Image (cartoon, rainbow, N blue to C red):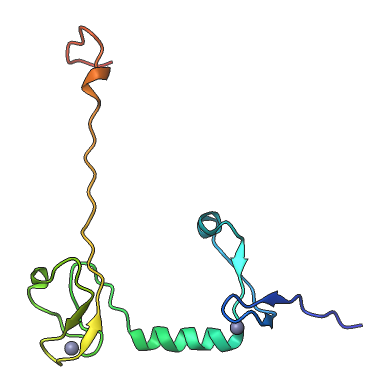
Amino acid sequence: MREKPKMHTCCMCGKPTPNYREYSPLLADLFNKSGYSMCDEFRRKGRIQTEWENEQSAERFLICPYCESFIDDPWQYEEDEDEIECPECKRTFKVEISTVRTYTTRRRIEDMPDGWNGGGF
Ligand SMILES: [Zn+2]
Ligand SMILES: [Zn+2]
């Protein structure tokens, strides 16, 4: 007797699919589930979309996803900008501008022990 593959439900269209992908522990924790299922059709769509988007995640540089040229003066664009026209090829593309987070920490003054002389604890 042949065993039937375990079926899951596609998270995109709700159709049954044998596909199942487990999340990494970090993601599983974040989404509060152990994985997700996506049917072949939506997997293909996702792949084509990713291919098309040609994401350029270079962090420090602004690169056009069409002609892949570096765009000078990226700081001229505001943080709330979500579309930019490439000065080279004149095509409009999506952009996410994020500022880099830095951390500065210090101990609270009110927690300084009385009579602390600036040495070790
Ligand atoms: Zn589906
Ligand atoms: Zn371009």
- Residue at the outermost top position: 115
Indicate the quadrant of ligand 1 in the picture.
bottom right
Q: Please provide percent x and percent y for residue 15.
A: 66, 82
Residue 17's spot in the image, x, y percent? 68, 81
* Residue shown at 55% from the left, 85% from the top: 42
**Where's residue 90, x and y in %?**
14, 91
- Is 67 above or below relative to 72? below
> Considering the image in quadrants, where does the N terminus appear?
bottom right
Q: Residue at x 51, y 59 (%)?
A: 27
Looking at the image, which residue is at 26% across and 71% down?
96
Where does the C terminus fall, quadrant-wise?
Answer: top left
Disc tally is: 0
Q: Residue 35's quadrant in the figure? A: bottom right
Q: Quadrant of residue 94?
A: bottom left
Figure quadrant of residue 7: bottom right
Front position in the image: 17 or 58: 17
Relative vertical location of residue 66 with respect to residue 77 in this rendering, above or below: below
Decide if residue 114 is on the left or right side of residue 45: left
Residue lying furthest right: 1
- At horizontal 59% and vertical 75% (from top left) the residue drawn is 11
- Camera-side residue of 79 and 51: 79
Q: Position of residue 9 (x, y in %)?
A: 67, 76
